[in-house]
Amino acid sequence: MAAKWISLRSVTASALPKAEAVIRPGSEQAEFIGEVRDLFLAPACVRAVFTAADEAIASGLYGRGVSPEQVRRAILLGCARKYATMINSQTRTRISSLQYFVPLVNEVVESAIRKATGTASAKSGTDGKRWIQIPQETKRPSAPSAQL
């Protein structure tokens, strides 16, 4: 039975993203990973360990251009959902990996894109209404006169 556990662990470990480069202490990426670590370890519903796998996930988030604020929002969202589950079903299982929050980071990022697009769309609609109210003669640029 122990051999199966070891083989399952090796399969799981091989499925993790590989670090492409060494992370230099003091770099922007290292600071991002430190911020993510602090955000991840803060909630009570999280097991208090930040593993190498969590670091690789944080590095991947950095590589995707995810902001610390988006990670913070994803963790808040995930913890709120986890606490609701813990209270309603009386489970005491805590979150043990940053991987738990990756789909929520994606949700937060997509929500920000939809919100930005919606804001642009609303602005476009407002600008369109303003455009309609402008007298017709000022809407068209004057055509250059043809001189032969």
Image: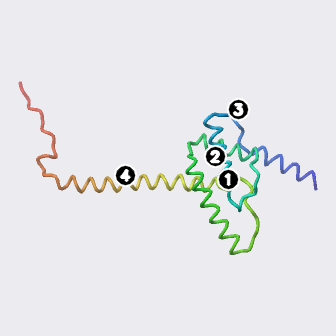
User: Is 18 drawn above or below residue 107 in the view shown?
Assistant: above
Q: Residue drawn 75% across and 56% down?
A: 96
Q: Residues within 10 Å of mark 4 (few under 14, many from 20)?
A: few
Q: CA distance from mark 3 to mark 2?
A: 18 Å
Residue assigned mark 3: 22
> Under tag 1, what secondary structure?
helix
Q: Residue drawn 43% across and 52% down?
A: 116
Q: Residue drawn 8% across and 29% down?
A: 146
Q: Residues within 10 Å of mark 1 (few under 14, many from 20)?
A: many
Type of the residue with mark 4: Ala
For marks 4 and 1, the one nearer the N-term is: 1
Residue assigned mark 1: 40
Q: Quadrant of the N terminus?
A: bottom right
For marks 3 and 2, the one nearer the N-term is: 3
Numbered mark located on residue 120 in the image: 4
Please tell me whether mark 3 or mark 2 is closer to you in this view: 2
Please tell me whether mark 3 or mark 4 is closer to you in this view: 3
